[in-house]
Every structure is written in C-alpha cells, then in structure tokens.
Image (spheres, rainbow, N blue to C red):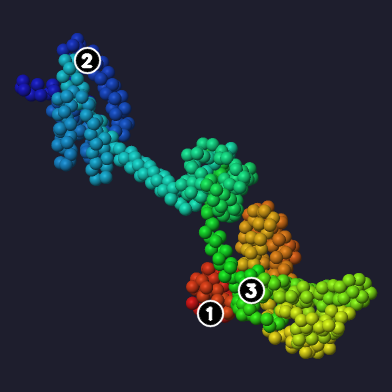
Amino acid sequence: MAEKKERDKTAPNREGFSDLDGMLCPGDVADGTALCAALNALRERDEALRGVLDATSDSIMLLDRNGVVLLGNATAAQRFDLDVDSLPGRVCFDLFPDDIVDKRRAAFEEVLREKQPVLLRDERRGMHMEVRLYPVCGGGGEVRRVAVYAKDITENVRQEAAGRRLRERVEGYRRNLEAIFTSLPEGLLIVAEDMTVLEANSAFERISGLRRKSILGRPPVDEPGSCMAGCLKMLRRTVERDEPVREYRFECRDGNGVSKVVVLNTAPLSGTGSPLNGAVLILRDVSRLVRLETELARQNRFHDLVGRSEPMREVFSLLDRLAHLDSTVLLLGESGTGKELAAEALHRQGSRAKGPLVRVNCAALPEELLESELFGHVQGAYTGALRDRVGRFQAAEGGTIFLDEIGEISIRTQLKLLRFLENREYERLGESVSRPADVRVVAATNADLPALVRRGVFREDLYYRLKVMVIPLPPLRRRTQDIPLLVNHFVSLFRTRMGRDVSEPSPDALELLLNYPWPGNVRELRHAVEHACILCRGGVLRPEHFPPELRSSRRERGARPAGLDRSAILSALEDSRWNRSRAARALGISRSSLYRRMAELELKL
C-alpha cells in the first residue's frame, strides 16, 4: 500500500500536474471549502494554460527526468497520432521512430548532464523539424523537468533553399554578365547623367586606347578628333533626348594616335523606378571591315564605275580589253548611265593614261563654233577670228578625245570627223594644210544612231566608222543589284565631302530605292543620296530623307525590283555559296522577296 501511495503521488493527474510540482499539498488545506477553492483555481489555471498551448502550431511537451510525458499540447499529440488526454504518462522515447530515437535520447541526457539547452534538427520523409530542449531546474539547481519545443520548419527550409538557389542564380548571372562584359569584343561604356564614367570593359580600353582606371569616376577628356569625342557627343545626345543612337559610324584617333573607323550604338538608362540615369555605349572597331569593304569595292568597280551585276561585269571586261588599243569606241546608253566615266576609265587604264583627256560636249556648242572648237582655226578664218586657235584634237595630242552627244553634230562636221577617222589628219579652219594627230577617239550618245541614219541626219559611213567597238551601258533599272553598292559608294563620298555623320540607308529606305524606276539612272541616284545626306542629321538614312518624288512613286509593297532575272539571282547565290540571307543582302532585297522570285523562276537549292 505504501508503494502504491508513493507511486500515486508522483504520477500525473488528469490536468498534467502532480503533488511533486509543489503547487498543491492537501496537508496545507484546513477544511473542505478551502480545498474546493484551491482545486477550482488550479482547474481554471490549467484550462487557460491548455488553451494557450493548444493554440500554438508548435509541439510542446514537459518531461520528467525519466522522459515520461507530464504535459503535452494538441500539436504534440497529433504528431504521434494520439489523443491529447492519452499523451501524459507515456515515455517519450517509445513514441519516436527508431531512426531518430537515439539522437533524441542523447540530447535529453545532455540536457540533464550539462543543464544547458540543446538544439536539434531532423529531416524525415521530406519533413524538417527543429527541436529545442530546455532544462527546468528546481531550487537546488538540479534539473527536475525538461521542456521540449518542436517546430515544423519544412516551409522555412524550402524558402531558405529557394532563397539560396535564387542567390546562387543571381550570383551566377552576375558572374556570367561580368564574364560577358569583360570578354565581349565590343567596347562597353556606362556613364551617369553628368557623363561620369561608371564602368568600362577591356575591349573599350583596346578600341579607345584609354586606360579604364584613368577614366572611371570622372568625365573623360573631350579631345577633338579622338574616339572619346565622338562617343561623348552621342552619349550626351542620348541622355538629353532620352533616345538611342543606332549604327553611328565615324573616323577617329585612339589614345595612341592610331586612326580607326568605329561604329557605336547607345541606349538610355532611365525610367520610372530606375536608380540610374545615364547611358550605355557599345563600340565596335570596324577598321578591318572597312579595309575589306574597300578591297571588295575595288573588285566591284572599274576606276569610277561601280557595279557587280552581270551587265556591268560585261562592261568592265570590254573596257579592260579595249583600254590598251587605239580603236575607236562608241559608248551607248541613256543619260546618266556613266558614259563619261567609261571614257575616263578607257583613258586611264590604257597606254595613253599619261596623255591628256579632252572632253567635248557636242550638244553644248552652236554649229558655227563646233568645227572651230574641234579642229581650231587660223587668224582671219572668219569674222571674229582675231588670232590662231588650237582645236580640241590638237590639244588631245598623245591622249584621248571624248566626243559626247556625237549624234548632235551637223552633216558638215560629221564629214570632217569622218576624214579624221580615216586618215588621222585634220585641217584648221582657214588653212589648207593637213595636220596629223595621234589621238584616240571615244564617242558617246544616248540617241538611236541607226534611226538618225535612216532619217538622213547622220552619215551612215561615219556611223560604221564609229561603231568599230560598241560598249552598251545598261540603265539602272536593269541593274538594281548594283543599287546598294552605288548607295554605299555615294554615302562614303558625301560623308567625307560634307563632314556628315551618316551611315547606310535603313531597310525601308533601301527598299524605296530598289523599287524606284530611276529614269535619270545613276546620276539621279547620286543626287538622291546627296539630298538624303544633306537632310539627315546623323546616323541611318531613312525614307523621309530622300526626295519626295521617290516616295510618291513607291510601287506596291512586295513588287519585284526590275533586273532580278535568273542570272542575277544565280550570280548572287553563287557568290554567297548559296546562303540565301547573304544573297538577299547582296541583291538589296528582303529574304522573303528572294524566296518569291526563286519560286517564280523555279530555282531550287
């Protein structure tokens, strides 16, 4: 009986308290009324405590020194699949799974031994628990109870893992961006609103010739003619207008005095919520590309004649073969097709290049003066001939005479020209002595000479004398493949002449040029590009920069530019090794237009 009584005194009651807690001793109660009052107070206190404990999502238990549960809340009971009233009195180590019981027992014993809190973290079946064991000491300092708080930190662990992964990704992005920033072949420069340099990569150092350390944290020196001067000009424009600059090309000197051709692009760094107002610049050194373009242009030209289309290749071939001969050449072509340039090429390419090239526009001189202008006169040959005059044939001795608009000369002058072509001799007006002349004759006309012969206004024998070798110059509408080349040639010419910061035309502008019929041929194209270069404030040439008549005659979108015949397309495809994107660029058309035209011609790769 004594043993049972002692066991009952130490066992927990329904509310989880025992007499050993020192909270209630029956011997101290004087009568039944006081006992009831004390019990009611304990019950109310226990219910309040129970409400607080059950409201928390953490598992809470109070253990004695043997690991017996004295008190546990609803969360703890739920974790062990028990009813809350059945939890007290159980040995906690019997409730834990086998794989963690030893770890929990060791922690419990450590608390009893060291009298210090212990923190555990468990992971089981995807659930993470954080367990804290606290010693509850009595008056003598011995550990009487152990409080256990267990918290499900699975979501916290997941969030920590997600945050860690996010930080790792951000750090990876940062490292990748830094690697890209430092390894890009393009120079990168970031400036603040006041042009203070915030960052620059090694490629910018290489292109500009400036050391990164010397420009960071300060506005760079704006030295005229330097690469930095052009960069700062466009960066200021970007910041002031809050708009990007695209493909701005200019020549400059780097920090070491080396001349370069560079292309830059800028973009503003601004906007709502942006911590930075400024701009970023991307700089490309295209000096080598320009040299290659120059070499390519040399291959696609014959002196000042530019073209790579099949008709122009035939012209170049004829000019090259005839340049070293003295045969008379007749250049045929519409106005503006480059007949004078062809005559210059014949002269400069041949053995007479060191001699003079004398140009005569036969349509610009009145009939009564043309004969004297060509062959000269002696004093008194006619009224007003006050002294001897050297004619153009005599002035061209040892060289070439270019007779433009040959179809406009009179029958009388035609006869004298025929005699010269037959005998290589001429007579001055008012003189009966024949003079020999070592002169090559190159004639040109946009007239239909056979029709003039049929009408009797041009001598047939002279026509046959002139047409020993005929070089027909194609109109621009029959060689649209050459338009991009010609445009770039003229842009480069006017960029240098005007000192304007202009680059190539935009795709829309190029399409406009390709679809225009060009009645004035290359001369009209040259004037159109000059017009655009004057109106363009810098950068890319756009449709609105070109003369209004080009825009008003725009053909239906998608129409095929003239001149894209089978041979032109095949030539472009062969030159580009059958890469359709490069072939389309070479032809100056979109890739879809090339596909359509290839389908029309039944061309298959």
513 to the left or right of 17: right
Looking at the image, which residue is at 82% across and 86% down?
A: 415
Q: In the displayed structure, would residue 359 be above or below residue 110?
A: below
What's the residue at 47%, 53% (across, down)? 185
User: In this rendering, which labeled residue sits more in front, label 1 or label 3?
Assistant: 3
- Residue drawn at x 13%, y 23% is 10
Q: Say which mark, if any, is on residue 349.
A: 3
For the residue marked with disc 1, what is the amino acid?
Answer: Leu
| x then y, percent, for residue 24 | 20, 16
The answer to which of 382 and 110 lies nearer the viewer is 382
Q: Residue at x 25, y 20 (%)?
A: 42
Q: Amino acid at mark 2?
A: Leu
In the rendered view, would you say 424 is above or below 129?
A: below
Q: Secondary structure at mark 3?
A: helix
Q: Viewer-proximal residue, 114 or 224?
A: 224
Q: Which residue is mark 1?
A: 603
Mark 1 and mark 2 in contact? Answer it, CB < 8 Å. Answer: no
Q: Secondary structure at mark 1?
A: loop
The amino acid on which the numbered mark 3 sits, given as a three-letter code, is Gln
Q: Which residue is the site of mark 2? A: 35
Q: Nearer the viewer, residue 595 or 245?
A: 245
Q: Position of residue 437 (x, y in %)?
A: 75, 79
Q: Residues within 10 Å of mark 3 (few under 14, many from 20)?
A: some
